[in-house]
Image (cartoon, rainbow, N blue to C red):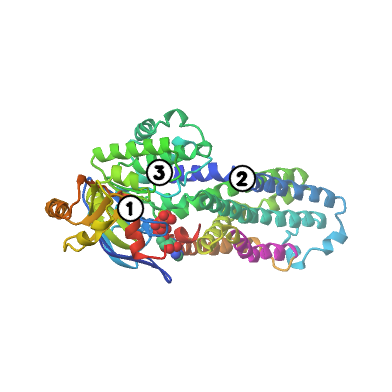
Amino acid sequence: MLKILIYKEWAEVFKNRLVLFTVIFLPLLLGILPLVMLGTMGNVTGESSLNDIPPSALAMCPPALSAGECVQVYLLSQFVLMFMLIPLVIPVSIAAYSIVGEKRVRSLEPLLATPITTWELILAKALAAVIPAVVASWAAFLLFAIGGVAMAASPAVVRAFLHPMWLLAVVVGGPLLALLSVSLALMVSSRVNDPRVAEQLAGVVAVPLLALLFGQMSGFLVLNRNLVLVFLLVLALLDAVMLYFTVRVFDRENILTRWR
Amino acid sequence: MIHIRNLTKRFGDVLAVDDLTLDVAEGEIFGFLGPNGAGKTTTIRMLTALIAPTRGTAQVNGHTLGEDDRRIRQSVGLLTEAPGLYENLSAAYNLRVYAALYGVADAERQIQKYLSMLGLWERRDDPAGTFSKGMKQKLALARALLHEPPVLFLDEPTAALDPEAAHLVRDFIAELRREGRTIFLCTHNLTEAERLCDRVAVFRTRLLVVDTPINLRRGPFGRQVVFHLAEDAAPFVAPVRALPFVDACEAVENKLVLTLDDPEQYNPEIVRRLVALGADIRFVGELRRSLEDVYLRLVHAQNPDL
Ligand SMILES: Nc1ncnc2c1ncn2[C@@H]1O[C@H](COP(=O)(O)OP(=O)(O)OP(=O)(O)O)[C@@H](O)[C@H]1O
Ligand SMILES: [Mg+2]
């Protein structure tokens, strides 16, 4: 049943060009852009760019690596983190549009008249948004990893930026973050009368998480490899709590009678 | 099949349904008539466990509202006011989604059965968004029937349909009754109610009256009898009106129109009286009131400024 509901969501949502664009081109762009940046940066690798790196990050650089290699490792690692955050952005638009769609054709009433539980409904909508986002960001990451390996100055650099902890962050952290933003989007949409407002609000809620990314990039805050596990654990917990609350605040009556 | 007790729904300051008590028997087509904003949709939403009543309760198919909501949803079919189809999905896929939601065992066969019955089988692979209003309504009806619910709630099934499509849908509803289903039909189409329903309720926030269409047409305002005279009827109005059992009497050219609650009993007395007054009676007949007339009187009696 979940499967058929998810397919239904996709068939409806991907007819929307904007959503399709977000899911396909955004990750593609983000997969290629870092490589281009890396390519141009590679030419100026030296003491000057070394100065731009926060000392805390440099300290983490394996002693065997040269300064130039350290810069590469640092940059590549930053981008790896970005791939974890792509799935944070994409699914919000899918989730919001799936609700806009239901509202537009007034299909929520017959849907809620079926014996479907709120859990099943939320889960189907969440998965329908999370799966494409995760697949798209993994594909983009694969593209990036292949490019990164090809451009890396030495095998040591590859080993450092494709460290198992970073991979874990992308492979596990991505979906967890996606789920987080989707349940946020769904929760907000179920409490707000206009689904478009819901999308914007959910976007606003995602801001602190994006701030984390920029904080990391500017060296303000360094999420190191050892913290990844803790981070993932906290995320998983947060997901469970958020999903629980999303189901709890999903007020069928309010949604049915207010959205017209 | 449906037992409603003191069902009440309030939206903030708006009283949408006030203290509704009503029973619908198994196998009955029950017409729920009322003007716009009467609270018909609200009533249906409460009975299908979509919204919770402010007060009161109901039993649908043996399940109590608020206690067995999932069982209620599983055992009723609902045709909503708007078809609410997934417009990018094919007709068959729309039904497939609902078959899965209702846990229909023989999904594909059920889909074929109802699409064929409603004449949509040839168009099964076309997106629902390309359908005409009538076809969408039929598809929504098929969707409400997939799980073979014993109780069916239809919210204005023929509104916005052209006469031919409406006729087809009505025939289909009559067919469903022959299968023994209980049907709760909301409508403001009186001809439809009269043709289809075993009993009708006239409702406007409160229940105004419940009866068979035939009884409703006769009363609650008494029956009307017309005496056709050979001469002008005006001089006879006053003496006839003076009779104790005559509720109303008026003259229209050479016709005398009387309102009585039992014409069979009182007509001979009136005839004797008229003859004694020197009238030449050509013939006597009953004026059949239309359901519409009764409906309008009921609805207006409650709210005279309409
Ligand atoms: N969510 C809501 N909030 C406030 N008032 C509401 C809400 N839903 C319905 N109402 C009010 O309740 C009353 C009954 O509405 P309802 O939709 O049940 O009428 P209806 O008989 O189905 O009318 P129609 O023939 O137009 O479909 C109306 O006055 C309506 O404005
Ligand atoms: Mg209505």
Measuring from the top left, give residue B4's x and y in whole percent. 26, 60
Callout 2 secondary element: loop
Front-lying residue, B112 or A258: A258
Q: Is residue A154 above or below residue B138?
A: below
Q: CA distance from mark 2 to mark 1?
A: 50 Å
**B299, above or below B87, in the image:** below
- Residue B46, horizontal then vertical, whole percent: 34, 59
Front position among marks 3 and 1? 1
Q: Which numbered disc, 2 or 1, marks the residue closer to the eye?
A: 1
Residue A183: in sight, yes or no?
yes
For mark 1, give the secondary structure: helix
Q: Nearer the viewer, residue B138 or B76?
A: B138
Query: Dot 2, crowdedness within 10 Å: few (<14), some or many (≥20)?
Result: some
Q: State how far apart marks 3 and 1 are (Cα).
A: 21 Å
For this rendering, which residue is in front, A10 or B150? B150
Q: Is residue A119 visible?
A: no
Instruction: From the image, tell me which residue sits under label 3.
Output: B158
What's the residue type where badge 2 is placed? Asn
Q: Amino acid at mark 3?
A: Thr
Residues at circles 3 and 1 in contact by the CB criterion of under 8 Å: no
The answer to whether B159 appears left or right of A148 in the picture is left
**Where residue A16 is drawn, which disc sits there?**
2
Find out if the beta carbon at label 1 lies less than 8 Å from the nearest ligand 1 atom: no
The crowd level at tag 3 (other Cα within 10 Å; few <14, some 14-19, many 20+) is many
Q: Return the residue at label 1.
A: B293
Q: Residue at x 33, y 58 (%)?
A: B297
Residue appearing at x 59%, y 54% in the figure: A174
The local secondary structure at tag 3 comes to: loop
